[in-house]
Amino acid sequence: MQPLEVGDPAAIGPYRLLGRLGAGGMGRVYLARSEGGRTVAVKVVHPHFALDDEFRARFRREVELARRVGGHWTAPVLDADPRAPVPWVATGYVAGPPLSRAVAEHGPLPERAVRALGAGLAEALAEVHALGLVHRDVKPSNVLLALDGPCLIDFGIARATDGTASLTSTGVSVGSPGYMAPEQILGKGVTGAADVFSLGAVLAYAATGTAPFPGDSSAALLYKVVHEEPELGGALAGEQRDLVAACLAKDPAARPAPGELAARLAPGGAAALVAGGWLPAPLVERVSRDAVRLLHLEPAAGPAGSGPVPFSSPAVGVFGPPVEPVPTVDAVPQARTPVSLSVSTTSEPAGGRGRRLSCTVALAVAGALATVTVGGGSLLGLFDRGDDHRDAARPPASDAPGAGTARQSVPKAFLGTWKGPTQEANGLPHGELTAVFTAGATGEDVVRMTTTLTVLGASAECHSIGRLTSAEPGRLRVTDRTDPARPGSPGMCTGTSAALTFTLEQDGTLAYRSDEAAAGRPHGTLRKSG
């Protein structure tokens, strides 16, 4: 968990925030405490998703499905506001690492722990399937290891099997390469047997430390799942190996039912195995330390309740990727709630000045890849960059770009005000850009920029200043930074400097392009105003 940063709200709904658990393609997750003292995980979606009516409908459906789940080995939905300006959902918090992190740090689990893990998850799936639901994304990062047993989380892409609408588009299969069932990859009908296949892959990973279908690309993983036999290694033996192999059968009808699997792994029930202590000592020590630290956390100061929740660049996650790094839809860090976690680091400016507020609206999502079987393509890449956060103050002339060389000036054709819409490299809208160019030479400030985005009637603005790096008759290169005289909307803007290019086109328009990964590498076409 990481501390709250500037621009984070003090509370969401009735929940006081304690810190950040992670962020990714769908939204940001906070650790919070209810008025009654219960610790919860609160997920808020990225504001630009709130503009999409179809997304809002899917989010409401997700909450409705998740409310139906809440057995002993799954996470309860405690509260939600899908109709808020920026929708949010609160779920129970689990004091324990995901299986992916536990195996990466401490190695494979012992046989008793694997049995308890498999029995608990199988019982959870039996209850889920009895509700007419299919989880569709059982994987190591969606399994948390608490002292009182395993917990299956993230029902964000669960699908109802009772004829109701799916959360995913027709013909599109969403899941995690290497853990998806063959029929899921091929876009065929998905039943509870697909979850059993995924559970078998998870148990193989827990027992051996490696995925049963290893590969270095999504395409390779998908091919192996459909066409090749799993690699189970030598750590799996006897009945446990037979059960895992049965779960990984290509034919859905040949896989055991979750209830049968649970009974064979733990004849007396998963609770009996867990009650005797199921985690190895290093994990028990780690979970206990985390629980003690949690007791000392104090809620953030500030007014109760919150309005629209802003976001900047991705949060720094506590937990990293699985041992076998594969693109996933949602990887949940230490919280019983569906999010994707992207781990990134932010460098401190020299001299300890702290992180600047931003230059451009940060709507780029940094999270896990959503795999689409149609065409084998991927949606949403990782926009993650270790930028050098330089001081916003203007450098001395001797240090300015171009010092000691022939100075170049802004051509007259660029002078004036330019406006136009921009979008990110992934096609998401990035707001309206206004750029005002004035005369100047290399090393001098020659442009002031404002990016404006309207979210459900509320506008967010980010302001920056650009220093001329080089000038040609039809092209300018500029390095921008936050405008210290015009603070932007808190939390809605990136905190990095970026290289910008402005090119005059033959039709009289101005092509704009930024290399700022944290902002999604926005670009657009500007037209002269006035």
Image: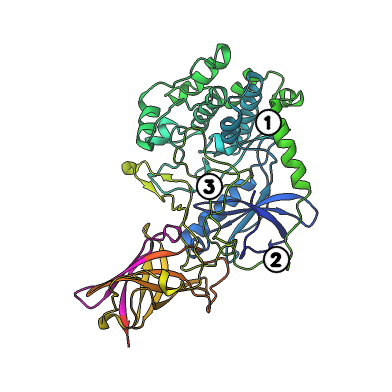
From the image, state whether disc 2 or disc 3 is nearer to you.
3
- Checking the image for residue 305, the label placed there is 2
Which stretch did the figure color magenta? 500-527
Under circle 2, the secondary element is loop
- Rendered residue at 46%/25% (across/down): 212
In the image, taking residue 438 as reference, residue 174 lies left or right, namely right
Which residue is labeled 1 in the image? 283
Under circle 3, the secondary element is loop
- Pointers 2 and 1 in contact (CB under 8 A)? no
Location of residue 402 by image quarter: bottom left
Callout 2: few (<14), some (14-19), or many (20+) C-alpha neighbours within 10 Å? Answer: few
- Rendered residue at 78%/49% (across/down): 296
Quote the CA–CA distance across marks 2 and 3: 28 Å
Amino acid type of the residue that numbered disc 3 sits on in the rendered structure: Val
In the image, taking residue 171 as reference, residue 190 lies left or right, namely right
Along the line of sight, the residue nearer the viewer: 157 or 433: 433
Location of residue 269 by image quarter: top right
Asked if 462 appears above or below 87 in the picture, the reply is below
Asked if 64 appears above or below 226 in the picture, the reply is below
Residue 460, image x and y in percent? 52, 72
Location of residue 28 by image quarter: bottom right
Callout 3: few (<14), some (14-19), or many (20+) C-alpha neighbours within 10 Å? Answer: many
Quote the CA–CA distance across marks 3 and 1: 22 Å
Under circle 1, the secondary element is helix
